[in-house]
Image (cartoon, rainbow, N blue to C red):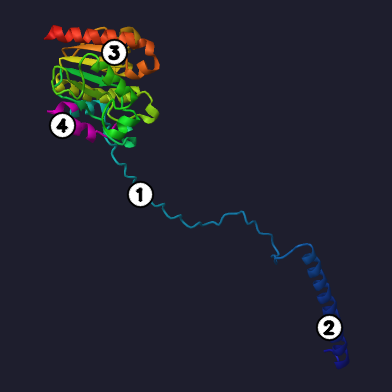
Amino acid sequence: MLSLGARARYLLHMESVWQEDWQLARAYLAWQAELGASDAICDAPVNRYDLPEKLAKPKPAMAAPATVVAPEAPQVDPVAQAQAMAQAAGDLAALQAAMSAYEHCELKRGARNLVFCDGQASARVMIVGEAPGREEDRVGKPFVGDAGQMLDRMFAAIGMGRETPDPARALYITNVLPWRPPQNRDPSTEERAMMRPFVLRHIELAAPDILILMGRVSAGTVLERDVRITKERGEWARVLGRPTIPMLHPAYLLRNPAAKAQAWADLLSLQAKLRELT
């Protein structure tokens, strides 16, 4: 056994060693902190990329809800629907109602009025124009603007008019399109095709002795072909079993006064045809 003095000397030695080791450990710790170490580590290295031996079984993914696909709406043929609606009309009032209910012509959305007709429905002569202009859209009747006034003067020269009560000298007037195109542009091919069944039914119901196609658009739509109106005006044809004559549009005559001689020749031809049929 150590003596009391020896034991005291040993304890003093160990205390000195512990103090030196503590200060050294503290110095090491401060040095590592300066290097950026922030976490304590174990004696042995750890590979954190190793997967654990037993992984938790993944939860089965929930099935995505079934997407309900709505059935496609049946495609509607605007021309076929126009034909069905036109043929179902038994008189002129029913035809006007059918045209008013027709929803496939976009011109309807921008027009003020449906321009259906003017004049005497019993007239021997029926005129089919092209489309309403600004005044026609405002009033709701065809040929009431400058071109309409020209038309009235033309037929007054041969003793005919829309206000005349006598069917033999009266006029019945309509258009290919019942709604005004924006900026008075020409009707498109699609617009003319979808309104053509209504025009043909209108002719059948009015049943005139003679049909006048006033202008290129009217003649091309009813005859269903390209028409050079300046070349084919005055040439008689047949539409729905009745004599038909293409004529220059009054608006064209206002722009080209020299063509009035041709329009006068066509009016005289109309007079002769009326006498012939009488």
Asked where in the image residue 181 lies, by quadrant, the reply is top left
Between circles 2 and 1, the one closer to the viewer is 1
- Decide which of 264, 18 is in the foreground and name it: 264
Left or right of 79 on screen, residue 59 = right
What's the mark number on residue 65?
1
* Circle nearer the N terminus (3, 1): 1
Residue located beneath label 2 in the image: 15
Q: Which residues are magenta?
A: 86-105
Between circles 2 and 3, the one closer to the viewer is 3
* Residue 11 on the magenta span: no
- Decide which of 141, 55 is in the foreground and name it: 141
Residue 167 in view, yes or no = yes
What's the mark number on residue 93?
4
Q: Amino acid at mark 2?
A: Glu
Q: Magenta-highlighted stretch: main secondary structure?
A: helix
* Circle nearer the N terminus (2, 1): 2
Contact, CB < 8 Å: mark 2 with mark 4?
no
Furthest residue toward bottom = 4
